[in-house]
Image (cartoon, rainbow, N blue to C red):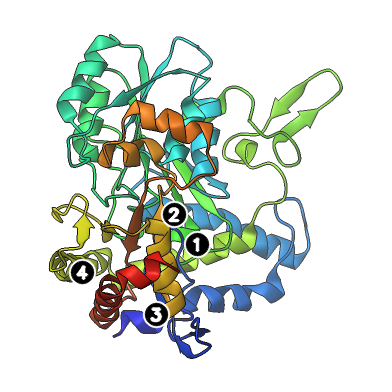
């Protein structure tokens, strides 16, 4: 398959528990992705020209500065941002991006932030302690309830500063109606942030015009989830939000003038990028963006939907497999499941040891969401809190990338059939 030829390491052999080598199958792409071959080529090609940026006058410094600064326009274009009104701030990952925004959004403790019950911890914890935080409800299948969103926007009567919502859930894969959410947020005077970590690598995204009611004010995403795992991410939003006030990280590159009596800060985005930037990470990110665009985001979305539909159909044939939120419409290619009677961590271990299949197990940094989906009551949550190192309720997660195949899903099906047939053996070992 063409897509498969674009990714590093797809045919790597790893040892099984019996010592034999077999081809590694990675169904853990929601956690991180391997690099594109083009990304590695871009890094290797640029490496001889790498140098310090911004104030260096040597040829390599000037060249490196041009690469770094011109990259912002490519990122803006990729997400449909406005280069006149928006800025790209480079960070390490989506988590840092959201923390940065939480430090710069407003300093009024009366500000309200609406998060949701389906968020990754990174789009929940940064808001706590700084703002009044409330949570938008989900239905029994884990999908966001727009009526509850509007009800809470009305309830807080103009005090909501931001609606912070995941673009696509890293647990269920559900894609939120972020344009509808944006319209509601703007109607009541709030901004919208979309956590794009699980969305941007899989589906075409457009922030839309600032004059559009459906405009997305802020988007954050990580390179390591889009085939550029070299420690870079991006926060994109209005320049004006970052013009006033102090940056959360202070140091080299953030100032125009400093004395012992005063500081004049740089303009954004420089003010928000303290220290030596991750230029190699930016080179990797741009190479990944170019590769995704060359493939076509619509083609990626279409292909990954085929994988999702095929895997969901296969797993639904097993009576001992419990699928969570099995409705596959409007989802990225993520499937959470459990095998009845076997701890989720044990299932993941068996898949790795006996079949070289990598999955994720646990709560996926979204514990409140998992607790809801598994219908875990508060009493049980308190028991877990008293012994946090004990075995916790959770799920097994399959998450597909553009390089995965239906043949790999067939191998997974055989593995699950084997686990179910030998359940008593695995429970005793």
**Circle 3 residue:** 355
Q: How many marks?
A: 4
Seen in the picture, residue 368 relative to 207 is either above or below; the reply is above
Residue designated by label 1: 285
Q: Locate residue 226, reporting x and y percent.
A: 42, 62
| Earlier residue among tags 2 and 1 | 2
Do residues under tags 4 and 1 come within 8 Å of each other at their CB atoms? Answer: no
Label 4 secondary element: helix
What is the spatial separation of the Cα atoms under label 2 and label 3, in whole angstroms? 38 Å
- Residue at mark 4 to residue at mark 2: CA–CA distance: 33 Å
Q: Nearer the viewer, mark 4 or mark 3?
A: 3
Q: Measure the C-alpha gap from mark 2 to mark 1.
A: 9 Å
Residue 284, compared with residue 250, is above or below; it is below
Quadrant holding the N terminus: bottom left
Q: Is residue 39 left or right of residue 373?
A: right
Instruction: Categorize mark 2 by other alpha carbons within 10 Å: few (<14), some (14-19), many (20+).
Output: many
Report whether residue 213 is seen: no
Front label number (4 vs 2): 4
Helix, strand, or loop for circle 3?
Answer: helix
Q: Earlier in the sequence, mark 4 or mark 1?
A: 1
Residue 75's tag is: 2
Q: Nearer the viewer, mark 2 or mark 3?
A: 3
Spot occupied by residue 218 in the image (x, y as percentages of width and height) = 39, 37
Rendered residue at 65%/57% (across/down): 65
Whether label 2 touches label 1, CB < 8 Å: yes
Question: Quarter-wise, where is residue 84 in the image?
Answer: top left
Q: Residue furthest bottom?
A: 20
296 and 9: which is toward the camera: 9
Q: Quadrant of the C terminus?
A: bottom left
Work out whether mark 3 precedes mark 1 in sequence or the reverse, and give the earlier one.
Answer: 1
Residue where numbered disc 4 is placed: 311
């Amino acid at each position: 398959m063409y897509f498969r030829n674009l990714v590093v390491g797809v045919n790597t052999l790893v040892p099984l528990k019996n010592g034999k080598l077999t081809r590694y199958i990675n169904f853990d792409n929601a956690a991180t992705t391997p690099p594109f071959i083009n990304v590695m080529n871009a890094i290797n090609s640029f490496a001889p020209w790498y140098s310090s940026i911004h104030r260096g006058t040597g040829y390599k410094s000037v060249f490196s500065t041009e690469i770094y600064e011109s990259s912002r326009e490519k990122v803006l274009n990729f997400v449909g941002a406005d280069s006149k009104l928006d800025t790209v701030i480079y960070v390490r990952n989506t988590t840092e991006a959201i923390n940065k925004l939480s430090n710069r959004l407003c300093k009024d403790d009366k500000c309200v932030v609406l998060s949701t019950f389906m968020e990754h911890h990174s789009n929940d914890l940064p808001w706590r302690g700084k703002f009044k935080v409330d949570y938008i409800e989900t239905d029994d299948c884990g999908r966001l309830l727009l009526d509850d969103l509007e009800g809470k926007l009305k309830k807080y009567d103009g005090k909501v500063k931001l609606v912070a919502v995941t673009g696509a859930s890293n647990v269920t894969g559900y894609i939120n109606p972020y344009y509808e959410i944006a319209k509601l947020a703007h109607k009541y005077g709030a901004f919208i942030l979309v956590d794009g970590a699980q969305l941007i690598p899989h589906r075409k995204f457009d922030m839309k015009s600032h004059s559009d009611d459906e405009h997305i004010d802020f988007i954050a995403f990580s390179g390591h989830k889009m085939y550029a795992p070299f420690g870079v991410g991006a926060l994109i939003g209005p320049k004006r939000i970052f013009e006033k006030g102090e940056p959360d990280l202070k140091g080299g590159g953030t100032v125009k003038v400093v004395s012992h009596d005063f500081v004049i800060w740089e303009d954004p985005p420089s003010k928000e990028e303290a220290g030596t930037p991750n230029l190699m990470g930016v080179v990797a990110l741009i190479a990944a963006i170019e590769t995704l665009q060359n493939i076509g985001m619509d083609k990626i979305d279409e292909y990954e939907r085929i994988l999702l539909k095929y895997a969901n159909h296969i797993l639904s044939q097993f009576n001992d497999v419990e699928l969570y939120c099995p409705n596959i419409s409007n989802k990225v290619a993520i499937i959470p499941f459990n095998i009845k009677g076997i701890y989720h961590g044990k299932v993941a271990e068996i898949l790795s040891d006996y079949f070289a299949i990598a999955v994720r197990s646990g709560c996926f940094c979204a514990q409140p969401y998992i607790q809801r989906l598994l219908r875990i009551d508060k009493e049980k949550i308190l028991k877990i809190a008293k012994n946090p190192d004990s075995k916790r309720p959770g799920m097994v997660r399959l998450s597909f990338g553009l390089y995965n195949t239906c043949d790999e899903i067939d191998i997974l099906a055989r593995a699950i059939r084997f686990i179910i047939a030998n359940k008593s053996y695995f429970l005793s070992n």
